[in-house]
Amino acid sequence: MNDDRSRRTSRTATARRLGRRSVLAVIGAGVVSACTSGRSAPKKTPDQASVSAVSTARVTVTPKTGTANTAVVGTLSVSVRRGSLTSVTVTAEDGTRLSGAFSADRTRWTPSGRLSPSTRYSVRAVATDKTGREALANTIFTTVAPEATLVAHFTPEDGSTVGIGMPVSLTFDHAVTDKKAVERAVTVTSTAGVEIAAHWFGDTRLDFRPENYWPAGTKVTLSLRLRGVEGASGRYGVQHKDVTFTVGRDQTSLVDVAKKTMVVRRDGRAVRTIPITSGSPGHTTWNGRMVISEKYPQTRMDGSTVGFGGEYDIPDVPHAMRLTTSGTFVHGNYWSSAATFGTRNVSHGCVGLHDTQGAKDTGTPAYWFYENSLVGDVVEVVNSHDDTVQPDNGLSGWNMSWTRWRAGSALS
């Protein structure tokens, strides 16, 4: 009896083990079937769907990314196969964007002008294929340094405060042959909202001014966009900058050679009349409107530098302010007696004011005028037995009519 129970117990245990194995076998078969069946493909995930939607358009940018010493002309282009270009953005390292044009079928883009030398450019081009799927290309390259450059030296300086007669004046270090291209690359704007016109003096100087003096308080901005501009054969501009200056108070001075006086006006009101001495009969002073372009507390004046041989050489002329490039100054004079001023014209063409040696005496007329003057102030001379100063002798463009001034633009 005990043996029967043992046999029944053994058969039951075996059946249970076989049952478990059968269940496991079924489960295992199901797992294998799920991994190996090819009769029904799984649904695509969004990521898998995007992989199959790659654009057939192929964008090519020339030059290739990383290229150095790229020529500034004829090297940059963007093209596409099996699609059309939708946008091309070319940006210089300073943020300036380069304009360009697409071909009629929008399979090619080329720049409208020259690239700037010594500049890092980034290119982003987008195209679409016939189903609207986008393709993108990005490139970075650097242009070659120019063998010959064109540099503009300008006045006034950035951040300066100047008088109402201050023009914007640029002097180029080499002759400009393409004046139109250079003038287009230089703009002058102001908060006064007045017309500002350009005028060329020869091949190296370009000035800008309004029809009348600047209103007091005006802010003026000179924008140089000369980088990459070919101003002469093989010679390229390198400057890309803005210069802003402020016009100060309204002050002008009128020198009457016959009366031997200078009347200083502030905001249209006479604030001081100063006795002066001007050019002697053999060395007369220019007539006309001149602009203070430089100020020196003391400076040397040597007659041999302006065609007067050894007639004078004064090492410490006080309170000197330049009016012309030919050598006309308004300055302090300590070597003539105080009685000279207002009574006799004894200079070599300059306008002299009473002063003392050393430029330390704050009570002299020369000290007062120096301290109350700005670069850009107008000093007008009348009643002299001489010609009117030439417009290009210093910053004397105010002696030219507005019509004649505007006619001097290369773009007029």
Image: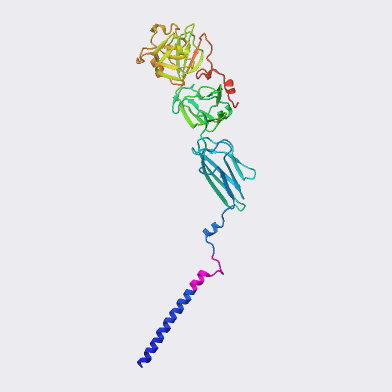
Asked if residue 144 lies in the magenta stretch, the reply is no
Say which of 242 and 56 sits in front.
56
Q: Is residue 176 above or below residue 287?
A: below
Q: Determine if residue 368 is in view.
A: yes
Q: Residue furthest bottom?
A: 1
Kindly tell me whether residue 84 is visible in this rendering.
no
Q: Is residue 36 magenta?
A: yes
**Extent of the magenta region:** 30-42
- Residue nearest the observer in this picture, 304 or 317: 304
Residue 127 percent across, percent down from the top left: 58, 48
Determine whether 69 is above or below 344 in the image.
below
Across and down, in percent, residue 204 comes to 54, 23
Q: Which of the image's four quarters has the N terminus?
A: bottom left
Image coords of residue 357 (percent x, y): 36, 12
Image spot of residue 381 (x, y percent): 49, 13
Which of the pair 161/295 is nearer the observer?
295
Place residue 369 in its image quadrant: top left
Q: Is residue 133 left or right of residue 19?
A: right
In the rendered image, the residue lying farthest to the right is 104
Colouring method of the image: rainbow
> How many labels sit on residues?
0
Q: Nearer the viewer, residue 4 or 163?
A: 4
The image shows residue 122, relative to residue 234, as above or below, that is below
Quadrant for the C terminus, please.
Answer: top right
As drawn, 82 above or below 187:
below
**Residue at coordinates 39% horizontally, 89% vertically from top-left?**
7
